[in-house]
Every structure is written in structure tokens, then in C-alpha cells.
């Protein structure tokens, strides 16, 4: 608490001096206004945090917070969020008295001219990211004064983490992270611009987001960030073995323990806790899990997979969640793999693991809730339907999630179980990949041979079934099958034929001499762009072709975006009341 008060007080001083400087002459012709004379020494705030890794050094926080507040003033008066690189260079130079190596802090990533959020004004943020701005405002409405700020800060950081890039086309992880941060700070600067007079409140928000220590459910403790990443990278090796052993001790041995069996040594319990902390995934108390789901009330039951039943619930911070209840000893490896996998990766198109819980004879995984269910329910449900545009957008989101995994900087992450039930849908039908129980990370330049074929019948790459080699092309094949289902609304095997035929073979037969209308989902009712449909069909067939002929997920994203653009243009050029309209939203 003392550290938080210190950080808060320091930031309040910085914001107050920045506010006072608004009436002062510009320094070095910088378009922002700083009062450097009253600022604390550079070493006074080295414990304030690095904004979740955005800043390269903790000691940069003082200068950065002054810069953020000044951007808020500038945006309030002129509109644009960010300066161009030339203007920013002058302004950062004027901050050298506060932080000598300010040019090495990483602030230069927040400049205009790169498209997307980098060129937003406050009005753009309000119009395009208004829901994120409202969420930040609603969950960050606190001050460091009542002693309850730690609990409230967790909700604030959740809202911060929920902000993603605006219509990003990036397929590599590094560029995606930059675009995400540009949008996050655009929202924060906009928020600052409308709360300039409430410096105490802004100080509390900056301190919370700067340290992110209040991120209770889905942010690893700051002291473990680098170590956690290293353990995650080794998921394919010995660490998983150690981790699974520890979880087995918690989920199996404790289950079989009788009253006559003495409790495990205290040393073992401490070792278990260390391993769980280093996984980077927060541990949620069992009481909170049962309270969130109303003691696993059947009315909260939303589905069941191979690993266990899933319930919806609400955590104490009012976040809606999905809770997977694992009681089968045989699924402990799945539990361990998901904790190790999902705790270290963040992407809008990957379901977020918020925490885990291990009890005497059961385990829980707590995820963000995707209220629209899964893709399978919408493709095959008789009373549900997805428009052509929605189908393309869901395909693009899913492809972006896979592309992110396949281009992960530390090694290619292979999902190994892509299918409609593992594609969850958010409130606005944004797609998120889920169920990483079979995932595997492959080091760059290496391969991995599985001891057995894993995955779901109908979606498994034939090459993988033959040689057991795990690689990203297997995910591409599975995605191709899903894409064919999005187009056709058909199951992977048509059992109604005299000779049951796999879906990709049905598509090939029709592609040689039939009409695409024969393959299209009847629920589309002909409302789609035939050009875009054919493009998507050919793409899906290329995904299920021979391994060496398959496209990468980056290429798939580009082609699907092209299909969406074609469909959007066709919609715009066709009057809605025209009898020739070929598709609709």
C-alpha cells in the first residue's frame, strides 16, 4: 500500500505541474506544455511500473506520465491524439531534464501517420471506440483514498487489456502489439482530455495502469513476467512434465488420499505454489469460483466438452466468465497445458484465460465469457442463422487468431483442434479461438513427432494421421474444413449419401462441374456475392490440398479480407429494393 501511495502521490505532482505549465511558454517550440523545473528527479519513480511492458525502463514512468497528461491537454484543445514524429522528437528532447534517456523509453511508438488509431482524434475515439472509452470510464472511477483501490484497479486493467487495434491487418505478433498499444493509449488520452480538471483521479488511474499490480485475474505478477515467458516457451519440453506432475499431485493424489493418509509435507505445498505462480496464471480462490456459478447451479450450465462441464458466472469484480469444471483425472494434462499456454498470450481473437483453481478433487479454468456461444451452434442450429458478411468476418477473426499463434516470436504455436465448437463468439460476433488443451509450441526450425494422433475426427490433417508430425499446416487443413462448413452449413461427413463422403471431397466434385449454389448453405437463401463465395471456396480447397500447396494463415487472412471487400462493394452498389440484389447483411 505504501508503494501505491508513493506512486500515486508522485504522479499527482507530475500531473499538477503539467497542468500549471499549460499557461507557460512552450519549451524548445514543443507543441505540448511541460514545466520541467518542478518535476521530481529521474530516479524518484523507478518503482512506479512500466505500463505492462510498454516502456523499456521503469524509470521512464515520470516522463511518460507527464507526456500523457500533456497529450490530453493538446487533444482537448486541438483534437488529434498524437503528434507526428518530428513534433514528438522536439517534445521528447524537452523532457531530458526529467529523464536523461527519455528517447530510449519507447514513447516514440506513439506517433501519428501509421494509420488506424494513430491518426484518431478524440471524436474518432468516441465514435469508433466509444464502448472501450465507456468501459474504461466505468471501471477506472476511483481514487487512492479509501483503501480499496487494489480491488478496483483490477477491473480498470481488465478494461485496458480489452482494448484492441482498430481494423488491424497485421498478421505478425510484434506489429499487432504496437497497434494495440496505440489504440489503448488513444483511448486513455481521450479519457484524460475530458477529465483534465480531476488530477487526483487521473493520478490514480495512471498509477494503476502503470504498475498493473491490481490486475487480479489475468495479469501475472510483474516480478514474474520474464520468467513466466521463459517457462511458457518451454511448454513442449520438460517444464510441462514438471507442471503436470505438480497438478497431478493436486488433482489426483489429493483425490485418492484417505483420512489415514498423513498430509503432504509442507515443503511440497510450497513447491506447488511456486510452480503455479511461475505459470503466469492467477489462482482464484475456490469460494469465488463457487460463488460466481451459484455453486455450479444447473441453470448456469452452458455446455460440455471432453474435459468437463462449463458454467457461466460472475466474479466479484462483476466480470462475466465461463468456468470449466474438470473432475476426470485423465484430463489433468489438458488442464495443465491450458494454464501454461493461455496465461502468456493475449490477442482479441483468442479466448482469454482469467485464472484457475485447484481443489481437493477438482480443477477449474476461468475464461472470459463469449455470450453468443460457439460457431457450431450458429452453423448447424435450425433456429439460428449467420449472414454472409458475418460468416466472412468470423472466418477472418479466426484466421487472424491462428496467424498470431503461428507467427508467435518465440516459436510456432500449433492449436491442433480447430473446429466450429472451439470458435467462440463475442457480443458482436467477434470470433475467439478456444480450447488449447492440445496445443503445442514448435521451436523455430524444429519439428515435433506426437506419440499419438490428437484432434477431432474429420478435422485432422491426413498427413498428420500418417506420420504424426505436428506443424502449422495441420491447423491450416482444419481451418479449411471449417471454412467449407461456413460456406455450406454441412457436417464433415455426409452420411445421407449411398457412400459417405468427406466435405472437402464433396466440394471438389462440385468445383469440377457443378454450381456453387449447390454447395452454398440453404440458410443463406442466395444472399451472398458469388464472386466472393467462389474466392472463399477456392481458398478453402487450397487449405485442404497437399501440405506443400497450402497457404499460410497470413495469406489466408489477406484472401478472406479480399472476399469481404468484394462483398461490401457489391452490397454498396446494389439497391436494397432491387430484385437483382445478390446478397445482404
Image: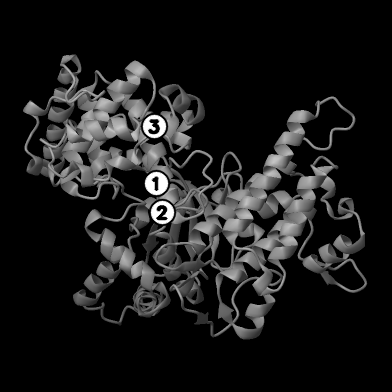
The secondary structure type at the circle numbered 1 is helix
In the figure, is residue 475 to the left or right of 347? right
The colour mode here is one colour
Image quarter of the C terminus: top right
Quarter of the image where one finds residue 319: top left
Q: Are marks 2 and 1 in contact (CB under 8 Å)?
A: yes
Q: Which residue is mark 3?
A: 187
Q: Is residue 112 visible?
A: yes
Q: Which residue is mark 1?
A: 178
The secondary structure type at the circle numbered 3 is helix
Depth order, front residue of 220/299: 220
Lower sequence index among marks 2 and 3 = 2
Q: Which residue is mark 2?
A: 174
Quarter of the image where one finds residue 197: top left
Q: Which residue of the protein is positioned furthest toward the top in this rendering?
A: 23
Q: Residue at x 7, y 34 (%)?
A: 40
Amino acid at each position: 500500500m505504501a508503494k501505491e501511495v508513493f506512486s500515486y502521490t508522485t504522479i499527482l505532482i507530475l500531473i499538477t505541474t503539467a497542468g500549471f505549465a499549460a499557461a507557460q511558454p512552450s519549451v524548445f517550440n514543443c507543441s505540448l506544455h511541460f514545466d520541467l523545473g518542478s518535476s521530481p528527479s529521474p530516479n524518484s519513480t523507478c518503482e512506479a511500473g512500466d505500463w505492462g511492458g510498454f516502456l523499456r525502463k521503469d524509470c521512464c514512468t515520470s516522463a511518460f506520465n507527464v507526456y500523457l497528461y500533456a497529450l490530453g491537454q493538446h487533444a482537448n484543445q486541438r483534437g488529434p491524439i498524437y503528434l507526428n514524429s518530428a513534433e514528438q522528437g522536439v517534445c521528447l528532447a524537452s523532457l531530458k531534464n526529467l529523464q536523461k534517456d527519455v528517447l530510449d523509453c519507447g514513447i516514440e511508438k506513439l506517433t501519428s501517420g501509421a494509420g488506424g488509431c494513430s491518426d484518431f482524434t478524440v471524436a474518432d475515439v468516441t465514435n469508433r471506440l466509444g464502448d472501450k472509452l465507456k468501459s474504461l470510464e466505468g471501471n477506472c472511477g476511483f481514487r487512492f483514498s479509501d483503501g480499496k483501490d487494489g480491488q478496483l484497479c483490477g477491473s480498470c486493467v481488465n478494461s485496458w487489456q480489452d482494448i484492441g487495434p482498430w481494423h488491424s491487418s497485421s498478421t505478425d505478433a510484434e506489429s499487432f502489439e504496437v497497434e494495440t498499444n496505440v489504440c489503448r493509449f488513444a483511448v486513455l488520452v481521450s479519457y484524460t482530455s475530458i477529465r483534465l480538471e480531476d488530477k487526483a483521479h487521473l493520478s490514480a488511474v495512471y498509477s494503476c495502469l502503470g504498475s498493473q499490480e491490481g490486475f487480479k485475474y489475468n495479469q501475472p505478477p510483474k516480478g514474474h513476467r520474464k520468467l513466466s515467458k521463459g517457462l511458457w516457451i518451454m511448454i513442449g519440453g520438460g517444464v510441462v512434465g514438471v507442471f503436470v506432475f505438480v497438478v497431478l499431485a493436486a488433482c489426483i493424489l489429493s483425490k485418492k488420499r484417505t483420512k489415514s493418509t498423513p498430509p503432504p509435507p509442507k515443503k511440497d505445498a510450497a513447491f506447488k505454489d511456486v510452480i503455479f505462480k511461475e505459470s503466469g496464471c492467477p489462482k482464484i480462490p475456490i469460494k469465488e469460483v463457487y460463488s460466481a456459478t451459484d455453486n455450479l447451479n444447473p441453470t448456469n450450465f452452458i455446455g460440455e466438452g471432453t474435459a468437463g462441464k462449463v458454467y457461466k458466472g460472475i466474479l466479484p469484480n462483476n466480470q462475466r466468465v465461463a468456468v470449466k469444471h474438470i473432475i476426470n483425472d485423465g484430463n489433468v494434462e489438458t488442464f495443465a497445458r491450458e494454464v501454461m499456454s493461455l496465461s502468456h498470450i493475449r490477442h482479441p481473437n483468442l479466448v482469454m484465460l482469467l485464472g484457475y483453481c485447484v481443489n481437493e478433487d477438482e480443477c477449474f479454468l476461468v475464461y472470459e465469457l463469449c455470450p453468443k456461444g460457439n460457431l457450431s451452434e450458429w452453423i448447424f442450429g435450425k433456429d439460428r442463422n449467420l449472414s454472409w458478411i458475418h460468416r466472412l468476418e468470423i472466418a477472418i477473426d479466426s484466421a487472424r487468431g491462428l496467424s498470431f499463434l503461428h507467427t508467435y516470436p518465440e516459436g510456432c504455436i500449433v492449436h491442433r483442434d480447430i473446429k466450429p465448437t472451439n470458435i467462440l463468439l463475442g457480443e458482436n460476433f467477434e470470433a475467439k479461438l478456444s480450447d488449447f488443451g492440445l496445443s503445442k509450441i514448435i521451436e523455430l526450425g524444429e519439428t515435433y513427432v506426437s506419440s499419438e494422433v490428437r484432434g477431432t475426427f474429420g478435422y485432422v490433417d491426413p498427413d498428420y494421421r500418417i506420420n504424426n508430425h505436428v506443424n502449422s499446416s495441420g491447423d491450416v487443413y482444419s481451418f479449411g474444413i471449417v471454412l467449407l462448413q461456413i460456406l455450406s452449413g454441412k457436417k464433415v461427413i455426409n452420411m445421407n449419401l449411398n457412400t459417405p463422403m468427406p466435405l472437402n471431397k464433396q466440394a471438389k466434385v462440385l468445383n469440377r462441374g457443378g454450381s456453387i449454389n449447390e454447395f452454398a448453405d440453404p440458410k443463406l437463401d442466395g444472399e451472398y456475392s458469388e464472386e466472393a463465395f467462389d474466392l472463399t471456396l477456392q481458398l478453402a480447397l487450397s487449405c485442404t490440398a497437399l501440405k506443400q500447396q497450402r497457404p499460410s494463415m497470413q495469406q489466408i487472412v489477406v484472401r478472406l479480407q479480399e472476399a469481404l471487400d468484394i462483398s461490401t462493394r457489391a452490397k454498396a452498389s446494389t439497391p436494397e429494393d432491387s430484385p437483382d440484389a445478390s446478397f445482404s447483411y
